[in-house]
Amino acid sequence: LYSKNYPSLFEYCVKVLKYSSASAQRRIDSMRAMKLIPELEEKIISGDLNLSSISQAQSFFRQEAKIGKSYSVIEKKEVLEKLENKSSRECIQELIAISPQSVPQEKRRELTIDKTELKVILNKDLISKLDKIKALMSHKNPSMTDQELIEAMAEIVIQKIDPMEKAKRVELRRQKNNTPQLPIEEVKGVTNRYIPAALKQEVYLRDKGQCAHSSCNSNKFLEYDHIIPIAMGGGATIQNLRLLCRTHNQRAAIEKFGFQKMQQYLNF
């Protein structure tokens, strides 16, 4: 929220400090754990705990939180104590013993410029669903691999939910039916908080589906931002709207309304 040049600490670690994605995440996880449990620093220096084991623990706590289980500081200390002087594999075994529902999170590892290894653990129900999709698509590809299955599903989902693809289909139908395109002002002359779908589509296409902040091109957690806020008289018009990632949207609000006013709405 405080950097003018980088949308996240992770981006800073990768682009400025030149860490790999995995190394950056291990350091960020360890830093956040040390803020909560300062004595971890001594254990890292002594070698009783390493960054990998702390990062595994942090991933474990996040995964547990998703299923509604939270850990106090004392409980987190107890978990980390069980990981002391353990290998990565032994840490995984310890964490699964604590919570059988806990499994290693998915991992991506770049092998070459255009090849990435994806490691993911699936439950029985999901495997059954994937096998069913393979069976349904067997007339097109009778010996479909898992990679081909993922590629086919990705294409279907993108066609269904990507605003860019939707806009292309709308334009093709318009051309096919020889329907005149309404001027932007006629479709989008709205000045209240409500943003019509046609206007959202126009903004999304104009900003190329990514954060419009000058130092960011993120395509995640995108939100429609009023350049001049509604509270200051701004409206939902093509000129007053832009796509921002959540971080830059929060930062813009802080710059306009001040940190004290916005603090209650921010999640750290």
Image (spheres, grey):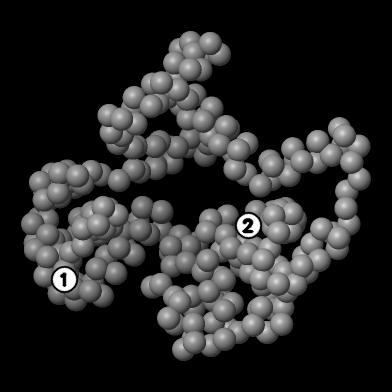
Q: Which mark is residue 137?
A: none
Reply above or below: 166 against 78: above
Q: Residues within 10 Å of mark 1 (few under 14, many from 20)?
A: few
State the residue at coordinates (71%, 72%).
192
**Is residue 81 placed above or below 137 in the rendered structure?**
below
Q: Which residue occupies 11% across, 70% down?
A: 74
Residue 195, position as x, y percentages in the image:
68, 63
Determine whether 34 is above or below 78 in the image: below
Q: Which mark is residue 73?
A: 1
115 vs 97, left or right, is right
Q: Percent x, y for residue 82?
A: 8, 57
The quarter of the image holding the C terminus is bottom left
- Dividing the picture into quadrants, the one containing residue 219 is bottom right
Q: Residue at x 63, y 69 (%)?
A: 225
Marked residue nearer the N-terminal end (2 or 1): 1
The x and y percentages for residue 261 are 49, 87
Residue 222 appears in which quarter of the rendering? bottom right
Residue at 66% x, 78% y: name it: 230
Q: Position of residue 56 (x, y in %)?
A: 23, 54
Residue indicated by mark 2: 210
Which amino acid type corresponds to the residue marked 2 in the rendered image? Gln
For this rendering, which residue is in front, 182 or 76? 182
